[in-house]
Amino acid sequence: MSEVVLTEVRGHTLVVTIDRPEAANSINADVHRGLGAAWERAQKTDDIRVVVLTGAGDKVFCAGADLKALGTAGPAGVTPPDTAHWGFAGIVKHHITKPVICAVNGSALGGGTELALAGDLVVAADTSSFGLPEVKRGLIAGAGGVFRLTTALPRAVALELLLTGAAMSAQDALRWGLVNRIVPQADVLSTALALADVISANAPLAVQASKRVARGISDGVIETEARSWELSEQALESLSRSADTIEGIMAFMQKRDPIWTGK
């Protein structure tokens, strides 16, 4: 297990923490491998009935991909080829039957929102925020965010977030059903663990079967998402060759407004 991903078993719950607060808990290859390994462990260990995913610190749950890793090593710096089938962060395509609760302890913009969308339940700090600002950088939310957000939220609400890149407060996320509960930041993990204990008290095979049917998981795949993943990956590949994408990333790193050319 990578040192940037911490794991702890509490009762029947595996607590998984992205431990890169100095890098806004962003995802690099080590985090990808660590999270993916934690998911594998949870799936294969009968005594683990629930997974709780959180981030270290009190400001950021996850800031998405580590742009430094992406810039120096390309896609492999974030998603290693040997485990690319797990998807971004080692989990967005890594469908396990154990319920996953995301304990969102702070900002969850971009890839952080996509991790929350990949989970099953969300307990969020009242100071947290959600959103997919990729269009502000010449990109799309390619880790499932584009199509999962329109399932998690009413279509018009989801499209406004996708097309404007605006953030949604924790209060609005609760109002629209993106999260299950909002609590003070200090209570996020304890609330998520209490929810995990309620789930763990139920018959584990019945809980797993309920998740499998509700999410449409068959042999580790959600068939209804297959076409959406294909379209998302095609769009990302096309955008990656555009001048606007390069400009968007450079402007973000240089902390200036981008100059779009539509090319």
Image (spheres, rainbow, N blue to C red):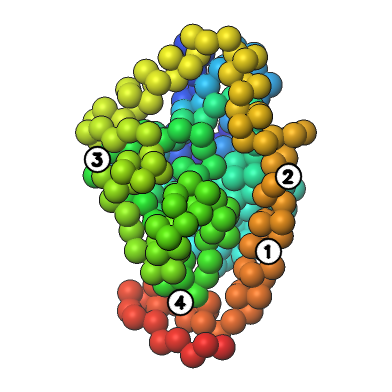
What percent of the width, then of the height, locates residue 227? Answer: 72, 56
Q: Is residue 79 visible?
A: yes
Q: CA distance from mark 2 to mark 3?
A: 34 Å
Q: CA distance from mark 1 to mark 2?
A: 14 Å
53 or 33: nearer the eye?
A: 53
Callout 2 amino acid: Glu
- Look at discs 3 and 1 and give the one toward the viewer: 1
Precedes in sequence: disc 2 or disc 3: 3
Q: Secondary structure at mark 2?
A: helix
90 or 21: nearer the eye?
A: 90
Q: Secondary structure at mark 1?
A: helix
Q: CA distance from mark 1 to mark 4?
A: 22 Å
Task: Look at the numbered discs 1 and 4 and tell me whether their residues touch, using CB distance below 8 Å.
Answer: no
Write the residue at 52% across / 70% down: 139
Q: Secondary structure at mark 4?
A: helix
Callout 4 amino acid: Gly
Precedes in sequence: disc 1 or disc 4: 1
Q: Which mark is residue 248?
A: 4
Does residue 118 sit above or below 255 in this rendering?
A: above
Residue 210 left/right relative to 130: right
- Look at discs 1 and 4 and give the one toward the viewer: 1
Question: Pointer 3: what residue?
Answer: 126
Query: Label 2 crowding class (10 Å Cα cut-off): few <14, some 14-19, many 20+?
Result: few
Q: CA distance from mark 3 to mark 4?
A: 30 Å
What percent of the width, then of the height, locates residue 214? Answer: 61, 32
Callout 3 amino acid: Asp
Question: Pointer 2: what residue?
Answer: 223
What percent of the width, then of the height, locates residue 180? Answer: 37, 34
Question: Pointer 1: what residue?
Answer: 231
Precedes in sequence: disc 3 or disc 4: 3
262 or 81: nearer the eye?
A: 262
